[in-house]
Image (tube, helix red, strand yellow):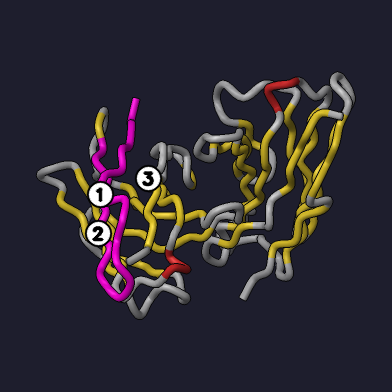
Amino acid sequence: DVVMTQSPLFLPVTLGQPASISCRSSQSLVYSDGNTYLIWFQQRPGQSPRRLIYKVSDRDSGVPDRFSGSGSGTDFTLKISRVEAEDVGVYYCMEATHWRTFGQGTKVEIK
Amino acid sequence: QVQLQESGPGLVKPSETMSLICTVSGGSLNAAYWGWIRQPPGKGLEHIGRVFHTGSTDYSPSFKSRVTISIDTSKNQFSLQLRSVTAADTAVYYCMRDFGWSFGHMDVWGKGTTVTVSS
């Protein structure tokens, strides 16, 4: 089974400063079609998850460009260039290459 | 714009079967997989399973023995049945579009419905 490991699990950030979340998979996420199905979700307090990034780095419509995804193989990163108050919540990575496995989640809070 | 809405009992007794329905509006169920994810209180996300518009299903291993997901395209609904529930099944249950070739994975989610297992 694939294991997705996020770090850190808790991320206090200062408004306007950058933030970075790591997601590592126990197996390569490159699918047989050449795509890498690594997805990032944001879950604001009291809300359902919202997809931010798919296929490692493709940003969903309406997602601010301060969010970016990168990585390959087994190592991936979500970056927020300048954190805003509305970015508070829990961020999950998920692999959809092998099945559907989520990371534990990273809670982003404002310092 | 496709929207999803979960419905069903908020309280289920231990050992009984939990049943939820997801109603899809603003679009068709065709050419996509539709699924369920749950989130126990204070915990992360768990994928339960998915159903294709044809009715074929895939279930996550930890739920396979006691879950059924079905679809009714005439009603634009799909449903979740989880048998022999225990307190560990208390969670917020989300329906979502699991995969569509035009949309990718999990692009649309319902707001979620809370299910409590208690006598």
* Residue under disc 3 on the same chain as residue under disc 1: yes
Image-quadrant location for residue B79: bottom left
Magenta range is: B1-24
Mark 1 and mark 2, same subunit?
yes
Task: Point out which mark residue B113 bears.
Answer: 3
Categorize mark 1 by other alpha carbons within 10 Å: few (<14), some (14-19), many (20+). Answer: some
Q: Is residue A63 left or right of residue A17?
A: left
- Mark closest to the chain's N terminus, 1 or 2: 1
Residue drawn 66% across the image and 60% down it: A30
Residue type, label 3: Thr
Q: Which subunit holds the residue at mark 3?
A: B
Please tell me which residue lies in front, B49 or A70.
B49
Q: Secondary structure at mark 1?
A: loop
- Looking at the rendered image, the quarter that the C terminus of chain A falls into is top right
Is residue B60 toward the left or the right of residue B23 in the image? Answer: right
Badge 2 is on which residue?
B19
Residue A11 falls inside the magenta stretch: no
Q: Position of residue A25 (x, y in %)?
A: 73, 63
Disc 2 marks a residue whose amino acid type is Ser
